[in-house]
Amino acid sequence: MPIATPEVYAQMLDAAKDKSFAYPAINVSSSQTLNAALKGFADAGSDGIIQISTGGAEYLSGPSVKNMVTGSVAFAAYAAEVAKNYPVNIALHTDHCPKDKLDGFVRPLIDISAERVARGEAPLFQSHMWDGSAVPLEENLQIAQELLEKCAAAHIILEVEIGVVGGEEDGVVGAIDDKLYSTPEDALATVRALGAGEKGRYMTALTFGNVHGVYKPGNVKLRPEILKHAQEAVVAELGLESGARPFDLVFHGGSGSTAEEIGAAVDYGVVKMNVDTDTQYAFTRPVAAHMFANYDGVLKVDGEVGNKKQYDPRAWGKAGEAGMAARIVEACENLRSAGTALGG
């Protein structure tokens, strides 16, 4: 199918909330990992979100170019072409963008989408993330207001982060302390600044102990009930029906989370869960196995010529893609999105 239109993306998020499932949002940094993500979603019968970070966008532009906008535009163009061959809807998203990279990443991309929309075309990306976790909440929300207005005009959904995700991702570092836990007051400040949809749709990454990177279950204390309390605070503030989930929530830093923690987060309104570390390993592990199993073939050892079929990048690339696709199917099953593709 073509890349999801703004209308289809909205339907995807509505379906996730209504039916209590979430979409894996898969970080990619190459055509290989993009193809693996597409296959994984198709194998799972799930629509999905494919995203690039600032580092991923820079990498996609080429090692001697290192331009995040160039890499993003190239990624979106390639994705738009190859996604047509898969029977699922895919939304394109840009991941964590801190304040110092807004002018070199998200703002120019929003401008490109605004120009496209003015010509009657779809936006380049369906959503963008503003990561204001490193600045005070008031400044975070002020910048979010400006970005939300521009995103809404370009038919784009904004993602904001309220709180801090621990660990490190593409140079954004969060300390592991009390700021890992968003409060009901944080949630209220967000809805007062950004509205409840009337100013434009946005997704909210409230934090409940999340940490980027690799950790074993139990090493970090996740408290999904924080999401429940945040939703309840906004329900009371807006006078909504009891049990409503006004926020479209995002789960960051989920590596090592238990099935119970993931399930609880989805029940409380998570519609998108970022998956990066686990799929990176799932791609690389089969590649390593190929290299070890075919040592004499991938290397020209002791003056020999090696085996072209074994060192051909397509040989180990296919193995990596298959491993990553399988991990995405698992993510879809964990998040209950498997078999829910719109029109599927």
Image (cartoon, rainbow, N blue to C red):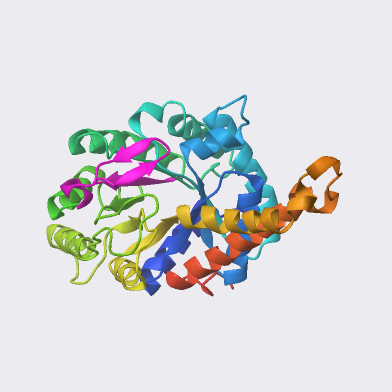
* Rendering coords of residue 202 (x, y %): 35, 49
Q: The C terminus lies in which quarter of the figure?
A: bottom right
* Rendering coords of residue 10 (x, y %): 45, 58
Residue farthest to the right, as pictured: 305
* Rendering coords of residue 242 (x, y %): 18, 71
Q: Can residue 304 be seen in this view?
A: yes
**Does residue 333 appear left or right of residue 119 in this picture?**
left
Which residue is at 25% across, 36% downward? 140
Residue 159 within the magenta-colored segment of the rendering: yes
Above or below, 303 against 209 in this view is above
Residue farthest to the front, as pictured: 302
Q: The N terminus lies in which quarter of the figure?
A: bottom right
* Rendering coords of residue 129 (x, y %): 39, 43
Above or below, 129 against 329 in this view is above
Q: Is residue 197 visible?
A: no
**Does residue 185 appear left or right of residue 160 in this picture?**
left
**Does residue 343 appear left or right of residue 13 in this picture?**
right
Magenta segment, which residues? Answer: 156-181
Which residue is at 32% across, 45% downward? 167
**For this rendering, which residue is in front, 200 or 274?**
274
Which residue is at 16% across, 51% downward? 188
Residue 330 within the magenta-colored segment of the rendering: no
**For this rendering, which residue is in front, 3 or 258?**
258
Which residue is at 47% across, 41% downward? 53
